[in-house]
Amino acid sequence: MRTLYKILWKDQSRNHLLWAFLGTVAGFVLLLGGIQFYLNIKNVLQENRDLLDPEYIVINKKVDIGQTLGLTTAGFTVEEIDEIRKQPFAREVAPFISNMFPVSAYTENERFPDFYTELFFEAVPDDYIDVKSEQWKWNREEGIIPVIIPQDYLNLYNFGFAQSQGLPRIPKEIISMVNVKIRLRGRAKFDDFPGKIIGFSNRINSILVPYDFLSWANKEYGYFENKGPSRIILVSNDPTNPEIVRFIEEKGYDTIREKLKSSRMNIILKFIVSFLVLLAAIIIGLAFLVFLLSLQLMISRSAEKIRRLSKLGYHYLEISRPYLLILFLLLLGVTLISMVLTGILTAKFSGLAAEWSLDIPEKIDGIIYITSFGLMLLIFLANMAGIFISTRRLCKG
Amino acid sequence: MIVRFEKVIPLPMIEQDTSGSGIWEAESVLFEQGKRYLAEAASGRGKTSLLSIIFGLRKDYRGVARIDDADIRSFSGKQWSELRKYQLSFVFQGLELFGDLTAYENIRLKNGITRHKTTEAIRQMSERLGIGTFLNKKAGILSFGQQQRVAIIRALCQPFSFLLADECFSHIDHANSLKTFDLITEECSRQGAGLILTSLDGTGNMKFDQRLMV
């Protein structure tokens, strides 16, 4: 049998196969590297989801001149809210409600300077608020209004205003101890209630009061025209879903961009990876063709020898063996070299990512093995069919 | 094994004058295992065609050719391959040697399929035919007569029920032809095989059971 291999391998164009080999390696590294890169980045994005906290996305309409002049409304209509609710990325949607009557707050305390301000309130159902407190409830008998203000407000005061005015900084605990009077006016009456700042929200940039309270107060005092909620809180299953950004932009809505960064990154990432995979597919396709053609060239160059072998009693399957062995060895080489190169790339990438404090695994993913094995099998089978067809035809003729 | 031709005639010969042919004109021709046949004729009478049809190399003929009652047209590639490995051996007129392999490698290419002969047996046969010293030379540089003997030894390196030899002595001198014929008939007897040998002439001193005019 050794002689059979010697005959069929002799005088073959090794250059063709070398180029096919190199091309396939290049295509494979690109493909496997692309997949690995995509998986890594996707993982990082998903891990950082909690950090960026974008599951709760607050959406509002863009402020335009029409709203300023009172020509268009800034509020969402019922239909618009329904439409958002129907989007596949929306798990829950809750509109904000706001006060429909004037609110003001003032202090009456010997230890603090007097203070008076006009205010606004907004409310969302309790589930959407990131501050959990036992004081967060409205009880008409007790009459205390719990308030949550954004962490940013306190930061603005402490690190901006107080610093520049030579005033003392105020820790959260102190703020919570300050008793504020809150005056609600409307429908020809006014009432004062004690208010208490019970927490600071990182999620919602507004002055929040319990939903129950504001619903009640709007009924009791409200006389402004209801223009619909101006803001909506959207809970998404997958905040990295690029559809969210697309939808928001399409509808002319607005949101805090920072929170959707990972979603936008996902779009760019998907684009880059699709491009890589497409490129890899083209390269692999071409390399596959070169493989096929090289083997066919080898076979047709040996046509006379193959016919002769057939006359000696060799079956076409036996004659195909040397070609299959070459094919197998080349593809095995391609797989191994591609794996090693992809492994090296992944490790390098992991080291680089570590400098940016991104946790990316050094090892290649299991799916890489499956992909390369599957592709190799496919290329092998297709080429095998090609070899069998050619040798069989020669043996018959 | 029995080979039977029923009104077989190669398509290109239909137009030709085949009068007097004991093969193409006959209603039925029978080749029986264990017997020696000589098919004699001048060039162009279809000697090679006769052997090629039996060996499955030619399909362009009319009539029915049977091996053990089976129409050979119905044989698959696999069946032909099996026949050529274990039942039919052929000494080609064109030899079909691989010029860039040595004489021995050429023989081994055949012997390797069934391991019918030992290396020693191959060496002894080569010595008998006077080509023992050429075994390790490339077949391409040997004279045609030497190559013919390589091809004959190769044909003997497999089990067979029939040996088909196509003008296998054409370039071998008379004395060597007789030695070669002895080797062939010895192997045929050992295997209980039939022999169909074609020749232009010069087979006077060789013994056959039946001489057919093609």
Image (tube, rainbow, N blue to C red):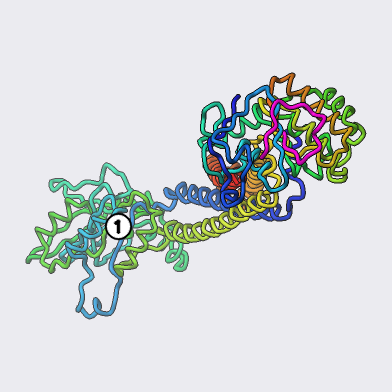
- Main SS of the magenta part reads loop
Residue B134 appears in which quarter of the rendering? top right
In depth, the one of A340 and B182 nearer the eye is B182
Q: Quadrant of the N terminus of chain B?
A: top right
Q: Bounds of the magenta span?
A: B197-214
Q: Is residue A340 visible in this depiction of the protein?
A: no
Residue A285 appears in which quarter of the rendering? bottom right
| Residue located 21% across and 46% down the image | A137
Q: Please tell me whether residue B176 is drawn above or below residue A147 in the rendered image.
A: above
The image shows a total of numbered marks equal to: 1
- Residue farthest toward the left in the current orientation of the protein: A188
> As drawn, is A260 to the left or to the right of A104?
right
Q: Position of residue A195 (x, y in %)?
A: 24, 54
Q: Does dot 1 land on a helix, a strand or a loop?
A: loop
> As drawn, is A308 to the left or to the right of A217?
right
- Residue farthest toward the right in the current orientation of the protein: B133
Q: Position of residue B200 (x, y in %)?
A: 76, 41
Q: Chain of mark 1?
A: A
Q: Position of residue B28 (x, y in %)?
A: 55, 33
Category of crowding for the residue at label 1, using alpha-carbon neighbours closer than 10 angstroms: few (below 14), some (14–19), many (at least 20): few
Question: Which amino acid type is shown beneath numbered disc 1?
Answer: Glu
In depth, the one of A328 and B176 nearer the eye is B176
Residue where numbered disc 1 is placed? A110
Q: Is residue A304 magenta?
A: no
| Residue located 36% across and 63% down the image | A246
Q: Is residue B62 visible in this depiction of the protein?
A: yes
Q: Position of residue A359 (x, y in %)?
A: 55, 46
| Residue located 13% across and 57% down the image | A217
> As drawn, is A113 to the left or to the right of A355?
left
